Image (tube, helix red, strand yellow):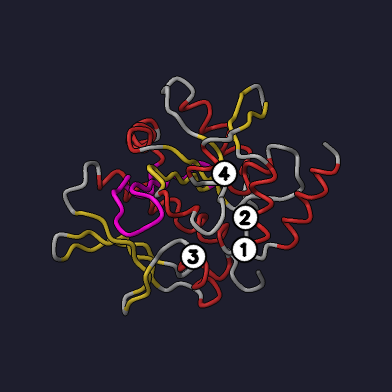
């Protein structure tokens, strides 16, 4: 993405504010060419910049903000496609940190394709788990959290967490059944019933079937990704 780069972000400011029982992590003076990346990360635009809101009484909010402040620039530039995403380092860090946690999880999205050797570079890692797993992952990766693990309402899942270790690691807990109403998704309950295993860097990782990921990509209009999946299926 031309224009949204480290040089352009020399004026980026990271701050926080508290109002009405909420604490806001704020990114201001953001280059206009990075605005879409901020919105893709769930930041809401306001007069003072782009922000994410959390409960002020969240445990360890100071520690989480410190990690956010040190990671926000890299996170936004990666999301904008202006910086390489070392997803493999992030996944290895995640596996090393959580392998003893006994969490029921699987890898979805582009990460699940990349570990099969399909030629693409994930922008982040998408981990699917349940409520207990979401909270346990938050504790296991506490020093990497850039947002607290939060309960969600009216969304695709009831829990969400975000960490940054080389790249974004995001997880959802208790995905809603209705996400599969219009066709199966690689993060939904139907995928959870049909998981396969892949060996990667000495670890066994559960992933959705390629056919299911292909269906989801075609439905979303991700033509290039769908073509790569079709090629991989043809070689199986």
Q: Which of marks 3 and 2 is nearer the N terminus?
A: 3
Question: Residue 185, relative to residue 128: is it above or below?
Answer: below
**Residue on which the image places disc 3:** 40
CB contact under 8 Å: marks 2 and 1: yes
Q: Nearer the viewer, mark 3 or mark 2?
A: 2
Classify residue 117 as left or right of residue 170.
Answer: right
- Residue 75's tag is none
Q: Which of marks 1 and 3 is in front?
A: 1
CB contact under 8 Å: marks 4 and 2: no
Q: Does the magenta stretch include residue 155?
A: yes
Q: Residue, x 45% and y 20% (percent of image)?
A: 100
Q: How crowded is mark 4: few (under 14 residues within 10 Å), some or many (20 or more)?
A: many
Q: How crowded is mark 1: few (under 14 residues within 10 Å), some or many (20 or more)?
A: few
Query: Which element is circle 4 on?
Result: strand
Q: Residue, x 39% and y 49% (percent of image)?
A: 176
Q: Position of residue 236 (x, y in %)?
A: 82, 36
Which of the two residues, 37 or 104, is positioned nearer the viewer here?
Answer: 104
Q: Earlier in the sequence, mark 1 or mark 4?
A: 4
- Residue 220's tag is 1
Per the rendered image, the range of residues in magenta is 145-167
Q: Earlier in the sequence, mark 1 or mark 3?
A: 3
């Amino acid at each position: 993405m031309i224009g949204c780069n480290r040089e352009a972000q020399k004026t980026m400011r990271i701050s926080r504010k508290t109002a009405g029982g909420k604490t806001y992590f704020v990114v201001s003076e953001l280059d206009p060419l990075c605005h879409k990346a901020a919105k893709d990360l769930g930041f809401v635009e306001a007069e003072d910049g782009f922000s994410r809101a959390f409960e002020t009484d969240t445990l360890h909010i100071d520690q989480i903000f410190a990690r956010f402040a040190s990671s926000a620039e890299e996170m936004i530039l990666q999301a904008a496609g202006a910086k390489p995403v070392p997803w493999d380092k992030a996944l290895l860090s995640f596996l090393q940190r959580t392998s003893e946690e006994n969490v029921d999880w699987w890898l979805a999205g582009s990460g699940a394709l990349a570990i099969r050797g399909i030629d693409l570079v994930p922008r982040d890692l998408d981990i699917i788990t349940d409520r207990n797993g979401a909270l346990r992952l938050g504790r296991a990766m506490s020093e990497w959290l850039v947002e607290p693990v939060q309960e969600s309402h009216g969304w695709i899942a009831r829990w969400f967490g975000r960490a940054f270790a080389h790249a974004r690691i995001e997880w959802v807990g208790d995905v809603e059944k209705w996400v599969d109403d219009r066709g199966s998704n690689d993060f939904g309950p139907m995928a959870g019933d049909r998981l396969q295993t892949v060996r990667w860097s000495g670890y066994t990782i559960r992933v959705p079937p390629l056919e299911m990921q292909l269906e989801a990509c075609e439905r979303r209009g991700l033509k290039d990704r769908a073509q790569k999946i079709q090629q991989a299926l043809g070689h199986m």
